[in-house]
Amino acid sequence: MMTHNIFRSALIPPPAIPEQYAQRYREEGLWIDQTLPEFFVEQCQRHAESLAVVGHSHTSWEEKTPPTIRWTYAELSQHGWDIASRLRAGGVRPGDRVLLQLPNIAEYMSALLGIFYAGALPVFCMPSHRERELSHFARKTDAAAHIFSSRVPGMDLSAVYSSYSQMLRDEGRIPPLGYDVCHPWELEEQEHLQELTTVMNTSAQRKSEQVAFLQLSGGTTGVSKLIPRTHADYLYSVRESAKICQLRSDSTFLVVLPASHNFTMSSAGILGAMYVGATIVFAADPSPQTAFSLIAQENVKVAALVPPLVQAWIASAQRRTPDLSSLELLQVGGAKLSRSVAQNIKPVLGATLQQVFGMAEGLVNYTRAEDSDELRYNTQGKPISAFDEILIVDDHDNPVPVGVSGHLLTRGPYTIRGYYDEPAINEKSFTEDGFYRSGDIVKLHPDGSLEVTGRAKDQINRNGEKIAVDEIEDLALSHPKIYDAIALGIPDKTVGERVCLVVVPYPGEHFEANAREELQHFFTEQGLASYKIPERVEVMRSLPTTKVGKISRKDVRAQLLETLSYS
Ligand code: AMP
Ligand code: DBH
């Protein structure tokens, strides 16, 4: 077949971790010399005959039938090599970046392995991302390819691909090649790839300490940032997570949240299941009905959910009394879980709750099997590693006493030292000595558990998906009628928080009664992912001013929230 001779730029080296830390992590055996593709090859050989993946394919996904794909680890690996060969035949080179945007179907796994086997780096996109997000990631990473499925109900991703590609061409860039899993790139028999290649992006000694992929972050400011995680740091967190979650080879794991989410991928998630040789079951949709039938049919032992989904599962189970007897562990994270919901999990769903407080930037905390109910319900657990450094500080970076809430800063063996290609943001998001400013307000319990008590970052958390308020506000300000805009998260029982946009029109401009529809249409046209589109719009003649002369958008936001929440 025709190959594309497009040379992509090299990966930009990420902010380096000082050598004395790297050396310590190596010496302590935290960072071992294994890359993700090596991990995949090894696990697929070790567990060759075991069932690896159960799920739908891109063709059967829309039907409400039982899963159509059941791959052993050996088969999964073969499918991975097949995709790798096709990517390479189509022009993807080792070190290239590949946008991975697939729904929860079995081919997600073969594509994941395929990208790594080809020596390329996945950029973990969400199925809900649209032109705006995808073009941003493609630009930022100079992506060589974009893997998607054109058969996603209700959305035409090939049209999305074409339209952002055109946008990039208009900017004088070369868009990524589109790889639609429904029409895979051709392959000639002799083109089969056999060997792993790992590209050295920096001069670090080991290939396992190179960047393995780019994960996404809601972060603390602005549009999504890319998180450069290394093979060694990520696999360390996966191995430890599998131990903490007490996974065994029969710990069948149900994927409900998007597979690309860092929680689903690594806490202990898909990679944790692969580490112990367990089966990964993909739910085609997150509804309790779909999940409950899979749990009963496939003997699912572990599932990971965001708090709003837990509530939906509980409500559904109370009505239908499904057979959930196999379910042992329900992991809940991504947003704060309320105590009342936490307490209902065991009695209604039969599973033990594990709270998971993590971030794609690194640090992950878990409540442990041996924790008391008090800790399990009220805290978000303890860090994975004794080498995780936690600082809880006031507004001036001074440490606060145990039991007092403060800003959570962290540094450690699997936490990044900076975002990908964001020097200005890194100045603000990391301290001089390399601590990540998480934007979370937490307090430390005497036993070392953390409790999330608030949030300092300007972010909306809808169903565990993070939305930066300035991304919405900046886009709103590009609307010709809008003079000023504030985005805020309104507390909501079903999704946690909903995006509300307060707009001030230019003098003489008006929004009719249907301001919400008008703006929703505008945001959709701008190619914004649907979960970010404001669900509530308020039109005001001016924004409230704060007591102090200087306008703090944060204070205005707080003031607005008080007036809007209960109206
Ligand atoms: P991100 O940086 O986009 O990966 O999002 C991570 C953020 O999600 C954390 O910094 C918290 O704000 C939030 N988060 C994750 N898990 C929890 C949890 N269990 N409780 C409260 N907030 C959480
Ligand atoms: O919200 C998150 O980003 C998250 C939650 C739980 C995460 O990245 C994780 C566990 O690893």
Image (cartoon, rainbow, N blue to C red):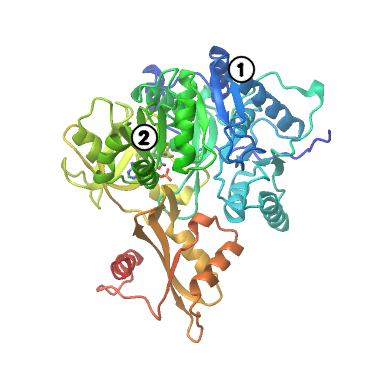
Residue identified by numbered label 1: 74
Three-letter code for the amino acid on which mark 2 is drawn: Gln
Q: Quadrant of residue 557?
A: bottom left
The percent position of residue 378, horizontal first and vertical second, equals: 22, 40
348 and 432: which one is in front?
348
The percent position of residue 1, horizontal first and vertical second, equals: 84, 33
Rendered position, 29 above or below 20: above
Q: Quadrant of ligand 2?
A: top left
Element carrying mark 1 = helix
Marks 2 and 1 sit apart, C-alpha to C-alpha, by 28 Å
Residue at figure coordinates x 37%, y 42% from the top left = 310
The percent position of residue 23, horizontal first and vertical second, equals: 40, 22
Residue at figure coordinates x 36%, y 18% from the top left = 28
Residue identified by numbered label 2: 331
Q: Quadrant of residue 518?
A: bottom right
Rendered position, 498 above or below 117: below
Q: Is residue 350 left or right of residue 14?
A: left
